[in-house]
Image (cartoon, rainbow, N blue to C red):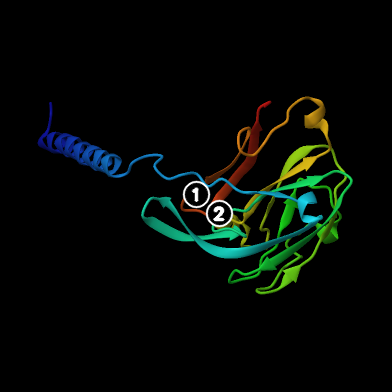
Amino acid sequence: MLSRRRLIAGFGGIASAAIVGRARLAIAQEVEPFSAPLPVPSLLDARRQGNRVKIAAREGRHAFIPGIPVRTYGYSADYLGPVMKVYRGDTVLIEVENKIDRPTTVHWHGLLVPARDDGGPRSLIDRNQVWRPEIKVDQPETTAWFHAHPHHDTARQVYLGLAGLMLIEDGTAVRLGCRATMASTIYPSFCKTGNSTPPGVLFTSVVARPA
């Protein structure tokens, strides 16, 4: 037999579902999906810079939703950093200046370098200071990335935008006929997640197709 309590509870559940459904519909109608342009990083070719590259970690503003700019970090940009292209056999002097409000580092993720140039948590760059690692590029053609890596603050700084791509070239793509350009055949993308716990960062990828 259906009791009064069960009947009231049933109607309460239906009413709650209806309210939540209307709220979700209202949000969907207010926010237009995919209306903000995706930031596409610039290309920084180390050889064209005489193998002397300068980047600065700095604060910026970016509107992920049109009309609602938020605080961000970036490497020489409001959000994220450049795609840095280096070549096997070259030695690249990189100058990293810290212009954000706290210490940071730059870790070359996937690059084969000695510990002194790796940019881990021990290589802190204080505010308004400069770090000058010398990178000897000696590994096969690949896609790597660089990001902030300070102890206890990595997730926050990377989530705010301190990350960039690094392309290591040794001529393999050219020999295979894959002459890619940033404008038409390489599309850099950063995939991130965020929730109530410290934000996580997923892998960075570059997708390329033959020209």
- Say what amino acid the circle numbered 1 marks: Gly
Most distant residue in the left direction:
4
Q: Nearer the viewer, residue 192 or 87?
A: 87
* Rendering coords of residue 34 (x, y %): 41, 39
Q: Quadrant of the C terminus?
A: top right
* Rendering coords of residue 53 (x, y %): 75, 58
* Rendering coords of residue 17 (x, y %): 23, 37
- Say what amino acid the circle numbered 2 marks: Tyr
145 to 149, vertically: above or below: above
Inter-mark Cα distance, 2 to 1: 8 Å
Q: Residues within 10 Å of mark 1 (few under 14, many from 20)?
A: few
Give the number of marks.
Answer: 2
Helix, strand, or loop for circle 1?
A: loop
| Residue 159: numbered disc | 2
83 to 94, vertically: above or below: above
26 to 135, vertically: above or below: above
* Rendering coords of residue 79 (x, y %): 55, 55
Q: Are marks 2 and 1 in contact (CB under 8 Å)?
A: yes
117 sits left or right of 24 in the view: right
Helix, strand, or loop for circle 2?
A: helix
Image quarter of residue 12 = top left
Image quarter of residue 176 = top right
For discs 2 and 1, the disc positioned in front in the rendered view: 2
| Residue 194: numbered disc | 1
170 sits left or right of 209 in the view: right
Q: Residue at x 76, y 45 (%)?
A: 110
Residue 34 visible? The answer is yes
Q: Residue at x 66, y 65 (%)?
A: 104
